């Protein structure tokens, strides 16, 4: 497998920091999936909660750089939320968040 470029790793690391700072994930309930799509429509989602519109622009740019598609950002109280949909996106952001946390703990 080819190594990722330095700029790609940098974007992943920055997204990992945003993920660890303030994000939450949603995944479908295995029990409820049997109900069928017409009754249960929850899917895979990460919401990155950000301080202002400048951070929204930064995060959206980073997401595009790593090949993830951001959803439409929206206000949530005094903050902003950027949703990212899909199982692959959720697993990637979790992985990058864990990598960043492991490096932070190793440095301490």
Image (tube, grey):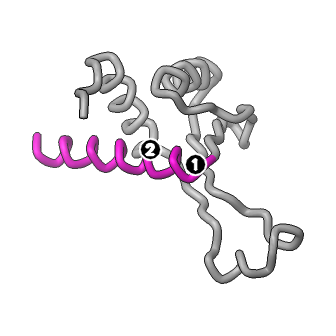
Q: In which quadrant will I find the C terminus?
A: top left
User: Measured from the top left, where is residue 36 in percent x and y?
Assistant: 81, 74
Residue at x-position 74% and y-position 36%: 75
Q: Quadrant of residue 7?
A: top left
**Circle 1: is it few (<14), some (14-19), or many (20+) Cα within 10 Å?**
many
- Which residue was labeled with disc 1? 46
Q: In which quadrant will I find the N terminus?
A: top left
Q: Is residue 17 above or below residue 101?
A: above
- Which residue was labeled with disc 2? 93
Residue at x-position 27% and y-position 45%: 99
Asked whether the beta carbons under mark 1 and mark 2 sit within 8 Å of each other, the answer is yes
User: Measured from the top left, where is residue 19 in percent x and y?
Assistant: 45, 43
Taking the view exactly as shown, the residue that stands out farthest to the front is 1
Q: Quadrant of residue 16?
A: top left
Q: Secondary structure at mark 2?
A: helix
Left or right: where 10 falls relative to 67: left
**Circle 2: is it few (<14), some (14-19), or many (20+) Cα within 10 Å?**
many
Q: Which stretch appears magenta?
A: 86-107
Residue at x-position 79% and y-position 80%: 35
User: Measured from the top left, where is residue 100 in percent x and y?
Assistant: 28, 41
Q: Nearer the viewer, residue 52 or 103?
A: 103
């Amino acid at each position: 497998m080819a190594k990722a470029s330095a700029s790609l790793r940098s974007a992943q690391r920055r997204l990992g920091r945003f993920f660890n700072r303030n994000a939450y994930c949603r995944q479908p309930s295995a029990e409820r999936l049997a109900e069928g799509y017409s009754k249960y429509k929850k899917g895979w989602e990460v919401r990155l909660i950000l301080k202002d519109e400048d951070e929204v622009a930064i995060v959206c740019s980073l997401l595009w750089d790593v090949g993830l598609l951001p959803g439409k950002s929206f206000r949530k109280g005094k903050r902003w939320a950027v949703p990212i949909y899909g199982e692959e996106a959720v697993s990637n952001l979790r992985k990058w968040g864990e990598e960043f946390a492991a490096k932070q703990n190793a440095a301490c």
